[in-house]
Image: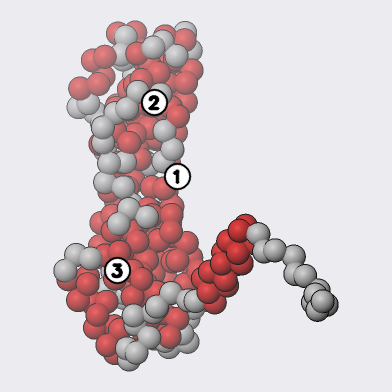
Amino acid sequence: MTRNSPTRRPSRPWHAAAAALAASMLVACGSTPTDETAGMSIEKLQSEARDEVEAGSFERAIKLYERLEGRASGTMLGQQAELERAYLLYRTGEKAQALAVIERFMKLHPTSPAFDYALYLQGIVNFNDNLGIFGRLSRQDLSERDQQASRDSYQSFKQLVEQFPQSKYADDAVVRMRYIVNALAAYELHVARYYFRRAAYVAAANRAQQAIQEFQTSPSTEEALSVMAQSYDRLGLVQLRDDAVRVLRQNFPSSRYLAQIPTDAKTP
């Protein structure tokens, strides 16, 4: 009788399945996504990105500019790609990402010839044509609305104008600064009216005073003085009311708002 060779433990089905799964995971981990731009020259990559922008394919253009930025790192072309990407992020509604790219650019390239454009773009991204009362009024309390983005936009434009007065973006920045000032003043006045209608006279007077102090040259100053005077009148603060009326009359002698203030406060 022949001697049996040592018996092997029978393989189990789950062992085979586990081995197959492990093998597939190794293959997956060892593979890398295909980079369709790997064989492109820098010039071709730039051309492709521009074509995608013209075609309105901003998402793909963003990816191409990101790759171009990496390959052309340390060059003006790389800097241009970085700013192009920031602009496209802004155009696609990714404002936070756009600002992050711009801030990184400013930190890494403080002497770049394109720094003026970076400031301008930063101002544009924060610039909001709606600016509070000019947009749709939601149910949010007006006093809770955040105007910080508009103020940040103003500061970017201001730095641009002061640091690069000869920049081709300076003139437009000045126009936008003027708009922001008038819009912010109008917003403060709107909030002051809001409080006045609700008999919150202290808050109304404070917001009107803020509009006057911060934005003295805005068209809202005239009505802000009137709201302030009327608020002080309702609070029984006669001296403060008369002071506000006096300033209103001196600066706007024909103001229609003078008629809204109690008679005893209109005498010089």
Quarter of the image holding residue 229? top left
In this orientation, which residue lies closer to the viewer: 128 or 159? 128
Q: Are marks 1 and 2 in contact (CB under 8 Å)?
A: no
Q: Is residue 121 left or right of residue 239?
A: left
Q: Residue furthest front?
A: 1
Q: Residues within 10 Å of mark 2 (few under 14, many from 20)?
A: few
Relative to 25, does residue 109 appear above or below in the rendering?
Answer: below
Question: Upstream in the sequence, badge 3 or badge 1?
Answer: 3
* Badge nearest the viewer, 1 or 2: 2
Location of the N terminus (image quadrant): bottom right
Seen at 25% across and 56% down, the residue is 175
Seen at 39% across and 25% down, the residue is 140
Q: Mark on residue 148?
A: 1
- Name the amino acid, label 2: Gln
* Badge nearest the viewer, 3 or 2: 3
Is label 1 in a helix, a strand or a loop? helix
Q: Is residue 3 left or right of residue 246?
A: right
- Name the amino acid, label 3: Arg
Quarter of the image holding residue 248? top left
Q: Position of residue 126 (x, y in %)?
A: 37, 53
Seen at 44% across and 15% down, the residue is 201
The residue that disc 3 covers is: 60
Question: Upstream in the sequence, badge 1 or badge 2?
Answer: 2
Q: Mark on residue 140?
A: 2
Q: Position of residue 191 (x, y in %)?
A: 37, 26
Q: Are marks 3 and 2 in contact (CB under 8 Å)?
A: no
Q: Is residue 168 left or right of residue 75?
A: left
Q: Position of residue 98 (x, y in %)?
A: 40, 61
Question: Upstream in the sequence, badge 3 or badge 2?
Answer: 3
Relative to 51, does residue 214 appear above or below in the rendering?
Answer: above
In this orientation, which residue lies closer to the viewer: 194 or 231? 194
Between the residue at mark 3 and the residue at mark 2, the CA separation in whole angstroms equals 37 Å
